[in-house]
Image (cartoon, grey):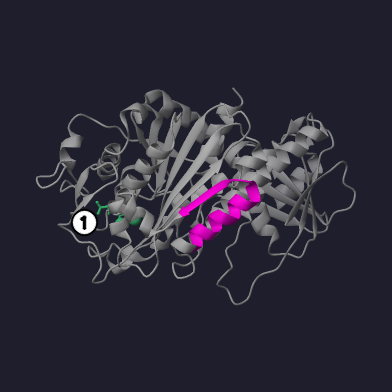
Amino acid sequence: MKIELVENIKNFDIEVIFIKDFKALNKQTIKILKEFNFEAKEGKHLLLTDAKKLYIGLSKLKNEDLKIAASNAINELKEYKFKKIKIALAEDKKELDLKTLVEGLLLGSYEFQKYKSKVKNNSFDILIDTKNSKKNMEELKKDLEDIKTICSSVNMVRTIVNTTPEDYTPITMAKDAKKIAAKNNLECKIYGEEFLLNNGMNAMLAVGRASRHESQLIHLTYKPKNPKGKIVLVGKGLTYDSGGLSLKSSTGMVTMKCDKSGGAAVLGIMDSLKNLAYEYEVHGIIGAVENMIGGEAYKPDDVLVAKNKVTIEVRNTDAEGRLVLADCLCYAQDEIKDIDYIFDMATLTGACVIALGEFSTGIMGHSQSLKKKFEKASKASGELVGFLPYNRYLPELIKSSVADIVNSTSSKGGGAITASLFLDNFIKKENKKKWLHFDIAGAAYKERNWGYNPYGGSGAGVRMILKFIENLNSK
Ligand code: BES
Ligand code: ZN
Ligand code: ZN
């Protein structure tokens, strides 16, 4: 699907018209729409082939409503053979926001067909008519390029997440990181298990021990000239989570290819920074590991010593993400000095999905002002978030009688928060207020469509973090 800006389009097969209400329409059109029972509501559409018009209903002409409507339009058009599709940006004094519109089109049209024997091939061009727009062509062109960059990252992340665990191993993730580095001029360091052993990263090493695939520590760096500051992103890249010896149930295991979503989101973000010309130095660190069973598997009752020498009593091998992140967070803070922000992203707990519902990312951390910034960035990006609070009593739950801390509590409640408090043991004092933890277990993957998100991986985290960096950038 190509998207182009054209001034005053004459030649097209069909025009998409978004209808919020009937106010600005002429009597004839209103009569037709009413005859066909069309309503200006989300999910409603009317295709009039003779008039070359596809009417799409929505309740507002902006933000998430417009993205969902644009996605609905594209998915309707996929059923037909139209080649040139017109969408007018400005009409009747109302102008659609180009970025919002294109985001809905590009994210809504994504389909994962890698494993289909028959691939649908209905390509078309979207021509956006810029006549009457208040913005000049240069501004519009830049907006179009920027949103294409972001959407292509989100869609790349979706594909990584959707790819099977046999086709996407820690080595595949490392190869992808190298490709992204070459394309964007990033520094790229890849380390295997020998490095983990030599650097005391025993928690991460233990999780991958029963896998045929060697664990990989990936470190990408984006370094613009004269950076305004330093951001570190750490991602959980479990290319499969069987639960290990604390084996998941057969239904619980299905979809666990999604456990690499945090790492994949880090790759997606790293792939956008250069095109967006952001002025922050950004480090992307990913622990790519597979959690399997076998004679070499790590066990409940084991005690692991993490890179910062904190000792961990393993009580559940399915709480593996926090073990991988623990060492990756230590590595990040040992390697990178004068950090301004450090964020980790992970499909960490089912408890987060219970707490916030399956559409929202859980955000946790010590800094209220940083969380406030993310309230703003998430809203502007279209990603849903909820904030889960710490308190003075919860840290008690992760204390161990055998080692310093346990990797899984016996308490049923607050599992997303106690997981975050576990990670807090691996955040250096000077970075406490610079750190946030993003639990994307709910939003990252779903076995159905929702809004402009398809079945499977959603690319959760990418748009929200890019928006946060954009907000810093424009200060
Ligand atoms: N990868 C899972 C969490 C998850 C659940 C991701 C649902 C996506 C959807 C994680 O490694 C896990 O298994 N967590 C356990 C932790 C428990 C053993 C303390 C969980 O949530 O049950
Ligand atoms: Zn697990
Ligand atoms: Zn996991």
Residue 385 on image: x %, y %: 43, 38
Residue 34 on image: x %, y %: 70, 48
* Residue span colored magenta: 172-190
Q: Residue at x 82, y 38 (%)?
A: 130
Q: Quadrant of the N terminus?
A: bottom right
- Image position of 19 with respect to 430: above or below: below
Ligand 2, by image quadrant, is: bottom left
Residue 415 on image: x %, y %: 25, 45
Residue at the outermost front position:
198
Residue at the outermost left position:
401
Magenta stretch containing residue 185, yes or no? yes
Q: Which residue is mark 1?
A: 316
- Image position of 449 with respect to 231: above or below: below
- Image position of 339 with respect to 155: above or below: above
| Residue 82 visible | yes
Q: Residue at x 22, y 52 (%)?
A: 304
* Label 1 beta carbon within 8 A of ligand 1: yes
Q: Quadrant of residue 334?
A: top left
Q: Quadrant of residue 392?
A: top left
In the picture, measured across the screen, residue 16 lies left or right of residue 38, that is right
Q: Residue at x 51, y 56 (%)?
A: 449
Q: Quadrant of the C terminus?
A: top right
